[in-house]
Image (tube, helix red, strand yellow):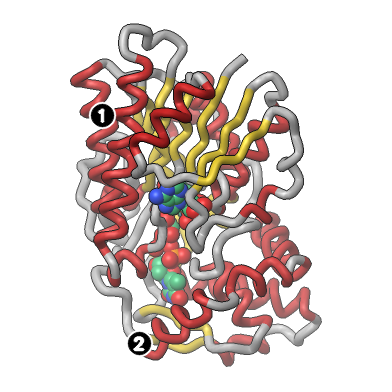
Amino acid sequence: MKRILITGGAGFIGSHVVRLFVNKYPDYHIINLDKLTYAGNLENLKDVENKSNYTFVKADICDFNTILSLFKKYEIDGVLHLAAESHVDRSIKDPFTFAQTNVMGTLSLLQVAKECWQGNFENKLFYHISTDEVYGALQFDGTLFTEQTKYDPHSPYSASKASSDHFVRAFHDTYGLPVVITNCSNNYGPYQFPEKLIPLFLNNIRQKKPLPVYGKGENVRDWLYVEDHARAIDLIFHRGKIGDTYNIGGFNEWKNIDLIKVIIKVTDKLLGNSEGTSEALITFVTDRAGHDLRYAIDSNKLKNELGWQPSLQFEEGIEKTVRWYLDNQAWIDNVTSGEYERYYEQMYRNR
Ligand code: NAD
Ligand code: DAU
């Protein structure tokens, strides 16, 4: 029996992790703690919400006393920490919220775990889910981020995640807290909030709205299907080495403009449009401030030590993803109504 606190379980990646753990481990108790910000949505977990090994708690990770009492009430022995503000563009507009949630929230969780587990760290684990953005930007020279790459964050988002990683390591080095950190590349798949490139673009294609490509579309990202990330998290949670870091990536680099053309092709095909119709929607807009040129992950450590590798070919993953969004238009319409619509209009008026 394990009692696992998953933070941010109502978000994109968190919901896939919660689903995997609830279904795969009926003898674990999964406690999903989420503040339900604009990015958190319990609709993402409809299929597991009535399972007897699942509990949802609406709370803020920054609220130390609430987290402490939940830890005691549920006798938590493992933490999978995913709750965060996750969108780079928002961090450029409002860095304070990112520092508050990503840094102070992580610190408050660490402090609770330390207080509750002190004196008995055996079979306990604090697992921080982090990003490859902490490593900064690569040039077009074929190099990859490894676990030894020095931190060099550029955006307020990546600075906040780098800071939280440092706190996690500091709690390991100073107090002996059993921790593990993973730094993952760009995820895609169902339930991703449509402010991120792939769901935003396929939703805009559906609505015949402009596709805002930042700069010249030459930046490169390394894309991984979200369920492959969730599988890696499961493996590392159970078999990762305490105190270690693991990089997770798809060995799947795409220049934005090329990726966008693939999204257009697949979406047009599924919508019954003739090939390339939606390329006319491509609109080059002002670049993102401090836009990192290239991310690419070397996940060989994870492959060699624990035998993980991505299971899905990119073409298959993209088609699955586009189909999911087209089949779940009510989900998109629901999450993009109201406050988000106003945010999006303002964001793009300013570009
Ligand atoms: P998301 O924005 O979709 O979800 C974040 C979740 O955290 C939401 O459910 C939100 O309600 C919750 N949350 C936010 N602030 C909170 C608070 N103060 N207290 C409690 N809950 C709060 O994010 P995501 O894309 O699923 O990312 C999850 C984690 O994985 C993040 O830590 C992110 O940095 C990391 N990550 C994301 C990617 C990616 O491509 N999306 C890649 C690597 C790492
Ligand atoms: O690398 C991991 C990171 O990937 C995660 O840590 C972040 O939480 C996640 O949001 C993601 O960050 P990115 O900034 O790479 O993702 P985003 O989808 O916002 O952008 C992907 C690329 O597309 C990036 O180069 C910017 C560009 N872009 C994005 C948007 C939203 C556009 O050209 N136009 C857009 O409208």
Q: Please identify the quarter of the rendering in which residue 138 is found.
A: bottom left
Q: Work out whether residue 117 can be spotted.
A: yes
Tell me which residue sits at (53%, 23%) in the image: 74
Q: Which mark is residue 270?
A: none
In the image, 299 versus 141, the foreground residue is 299
- 306 displayed left or right of 1: left
Dot 2 or dot 1, earlier in sequence? 1
* Residue 113, above or below 310: above
- 255 displayed left or right of 155: right
- 269 displayed left or right of 165: right
Tell me which residue sits at (48%, 75%) in the image: 257
User: Identity of the amino acid at label 2?
Assistant: Arg
- 142 displayed left or right of 206: left
Task: Check disc 2 and report the residue beneath it.
Answer: 351
Tell me which residue sits at (41%, 76%) in the image: 217
- The location of residue 230, given as percent across then percent down, is 57, 39
User: Identity of the amino acid at label 1?
Assistant: Arg
* Residue 335, above or below 17: below
Q: Which mark is residue 169?
A: 1
- The location of residue 10, given as percent across then percent down, is 57, 49
- The location of residue 87, given as percent across then percent down, is 40, 62
Q: Quadrant of the C terminus?
A: bottom left
Callout 2: SS: loop
Q: Quadrant of ligand 2?
A: bottom left
Q: Residues within 10 Å of mark 2 (few under 14, many from 20)?
A: few
